[in-house]
Amino acid sequence: MSDCIFCSIAAGEIDAEVVFENDYAIGFLDANPVVDGHTVVVPKEHFERFTDLTEEVATGVFATVREVNEAIQNGLGADGTNIGINDGEAAGQAIPHTHVHVIPRYHDDGGGSLHSIVSGAQESDLKEIGEKLRAETYGD
């Protein structure tokens, strides 16, 4: 997509601080990091939503995420990482090109877990939710 910034970065048309790439994906430092080392991994091919990825590309993207994650922990001495995808506008996806954030974490950095993103209690029965999800994944 010619007007997609991530496609332009993947094509080498826009400079980025690339830390790893393979045939399917590229990992580069986030231009607006929440912490030093915050890296974004994007598929080289344009896919707007996570569910648009082919299985082959998803495998390549997550192989890149794995490499970046290891580099962050070993190269920066991070105690851990948060790995996340904002999938869709309601989830905070600002650029309509699937991307995975790999964010270094340190003991006592003041951040929370992924559970801290949304607040609210579970309102539905787990069995009912499970049935709905199974109906979609396995069919009726």
Image (spheres, helix red, strand yellow):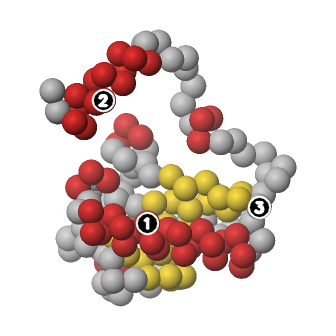
How far across and down, in percent of the image, does residue 17 sit? 53, 82
Indicate the amino acid at tag 2: Leu
Q: Amino acid at mark 3?
A: Asp
Q: CA distance from mark 1 to mark 2?
A: 24 Å
Q: Is residue 112 left or right of residue 84?
A: right
Pinpoint residue 18: horizontal percent, then vertical percent. Answer: 50, 82
Mark 1 burial class by Cα count in 10 Å: few <14, some 14-19, many 20+ = some
Q: Could you tell me which secondary element the residue under label 3 belongs to?
A: loop
Q: Is residue 90 left or right of residue 1?
A: right
Residue at x 54% of width, y 31% of height = 118
Tell me the amino acid under the disc marked 1: Phe
Task: Please say if 121 is above or below 140.
Answer: above
> 41 above or below 12?
above
- On residue 62, the disc is 1
Question: Which label belongs to residue 89?
Answer: none
Residue 40, placed above or below residue 20: above
Dot 3 corresponds to which residue? 79
Lower position in the chain sequence, tag 2 or tag 3: 3
Which of the two marks, 2 or 3, is nearer to us in this view?
Answer: 2
Which residue lies at the image location 45% right of the left edge and 60% below the top edge? 100
Give the numbered dot on residue 133: 2
